[in-house]
Image (tube, grey):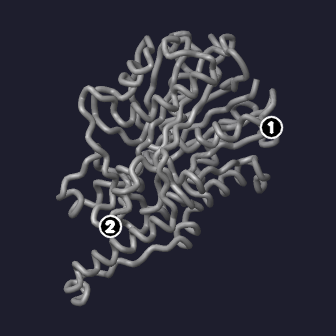
């Protein structure tokens, strides 16, 4: 058996940013258009008028201030309200492969590795641009990696589930060096025309290199344990498996885009996640005082504050539970990895932390790591 370790990580950040102010202007213009188009039915009491959004509402509900996206113009067009992503030719790299490749190269550079030294690529993400061929195999080819590759989807927990799969294979010796890539193009699946959720998601890609600790070329994070759990729920759902929407789906099928029952999710997921992390730590013999860092899924600041307090038994000190939500919004499975990547360089040998992601499924995955 081999000790698996994270030896490199990277984050691809799109160049286009949408602020809350910009998003609200576009949404309110759309709402006014919708109300005008349905004025007769609204006056007859058959429909409720669509209310306006506000930056204050978004910040209070989520803690989000900005989000990065692959296409800003389409999202902010009141007549469209979803990204204008150009179709790729079959011979061109897909958008997810392109995003993932950037993050993967950063992770490889940090690990001191090249693509041909990777023998497993996992593309773990909640939204995929196509059913097949696998995005992971495309990334494998673009990197010049060997071995094998496959896609997986456990919604917002995809990254930690991918890390468990890769770490298990490194530990068992079936692969020597793995790359887990999380290209999340959430903007294409978000319903930007729904006031209750139009502000939630952004686009990003993350990647981590996992290899035998004995092979590490520099500082690393030893993976002391991984733990995953799922429990079926319809409270977070998306029935559309593709990026493109038909006119009928846009007009008549609200369930074809991201949907959630936020109150139920808050009530049901928080106890599940807190108990999961505490159980995983207890299993490993870790105590709350052993932790230097909690890198949590970035869905909602209030949720993370609750989980951090439950796990640590107190209000987290500044820096113990870093949030990137205000800048990136919810980036699905990539969120906890962004937090890890941007808030781990200051840790010293012996410092311990937990990477945890959770979401639709329900699903929750945790990774116990130690700086070495």
Percent across and percent down for residue 23 are 45, 65
Quarter of the rendering occupied by the C terminus: top right
Image point 54% across, 34% down: which residue? 160
Q: Nearer the viewer, residue 174 or 211?
A: 211
Label 2, residues with CA under 10 Å away: few <14, some 14-19, many ≥20: many
- Quarter of the image for residue 136 reads top left
Quadrant of the rendered image containing residue 270: bottom right
Q: Residue at x 62, y 10 (%)?
A: 1
Image position of 103 (left or right of 304) = left
Which labelled disc corresponds to residue 290?
A: 1
- Where residue 264 appears, as percent x and y from the top left, is 48, 61
**Which residue does the image show at 57% across and 66% down from the upper left?**
59
Q: Residue at x 69, y 41 (%)?
A: 343
Name the secondary structure under disc 1. Answer: helix
Q: Is residue 342 visible?
A: yes
Residue 246, horizontal then vertical, whole percent: 19, 53
Q: Residue tagged by mark 2?
A: 78
Above or below, 310 against 31 in this view is above
Residue 290 position within the rendered picture, expressed as x and y whole percent measured from the top left: 80, 37
Query: How far is the residue under mark 2 from the one under mark 1?
Result: 50 Å
Farthest residue, direction bottom: 43
Q: Quadrant of residue 224?
A: top right
Is 147 displayed left or right of 77 in the figure? right
């Amino acid at each position: 058996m081999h000790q698996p370790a994270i030896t490199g990580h990277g984050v691809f950040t799109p160049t286009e940013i949408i602020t809350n102010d910009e998003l609200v202007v576009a949404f309110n213009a759309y709402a006014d258009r919708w109300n005008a188009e349905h004025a007769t039915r609204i006056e007859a009491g058959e429909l409720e008028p669509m209310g306006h959004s506000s930056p204050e509402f978004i910040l209070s509900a989520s803690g989000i201030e900005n989000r990065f996206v692959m296409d800003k113009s389409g999202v902010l067009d009141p007549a469209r309200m979803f990204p204008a992503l150009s179709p790729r030719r079959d011979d061109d790299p897909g958008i997810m492969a392109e995003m993932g490749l950037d993050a993967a190269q950063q992770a490889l550079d940090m690990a001191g590795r090249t693509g041909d030294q990777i023998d497993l690529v996992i593309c773990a993400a909640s939204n995929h641009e196509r059913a097949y061929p696998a995005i992971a195999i495309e990334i494998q080819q673009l990197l010049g990696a060997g071995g094998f590759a496959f896609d997986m989807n456990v919604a917002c927990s995809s990254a930690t589930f991918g890390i468990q799969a890769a770490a298990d294979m490194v530990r068992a010796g079936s692969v020597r060096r793995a790359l887990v890539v999380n290209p999340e193009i959430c903007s294409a699946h978000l319903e930007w025309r729904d006031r209750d959720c139009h502000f939630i998601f952004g686009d990003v890609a993350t990647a981590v290199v996992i290899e035998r600790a004995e092979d590490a070329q520099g500082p690393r994070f030893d993976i002391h344990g991984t733990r995953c759990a799922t429990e079926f729920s319809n409270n977070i759902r998306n029935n559309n498996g593709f990026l493109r929407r038909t006119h009928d789906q846009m007009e008549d099928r609200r369930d074809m885009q991201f949907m959630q029952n936020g109150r139920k999710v808050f009530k049901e997921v928080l106890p599940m996640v807190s108990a999961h992390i505490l159980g995983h730590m207890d299993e490993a013999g870790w105590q709350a005082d052993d932790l230097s860092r909690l890198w949590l899924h970035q869905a909602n600041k209030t949720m993370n504050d609750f989980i951090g307090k439950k796990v640590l038994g107190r209000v987290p000190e500044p820096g113990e539970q870093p949030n990137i939500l205000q800048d990136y919004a919810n980036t699905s499975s990539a969120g906890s990895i962004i937090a890890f990547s941007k808030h781990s360089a200051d840790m010293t040998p012996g410092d311990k932390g937990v990477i945890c992601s959770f979401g639709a499924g329900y699903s929750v995955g945790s990774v116990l790591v130690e700086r070495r």
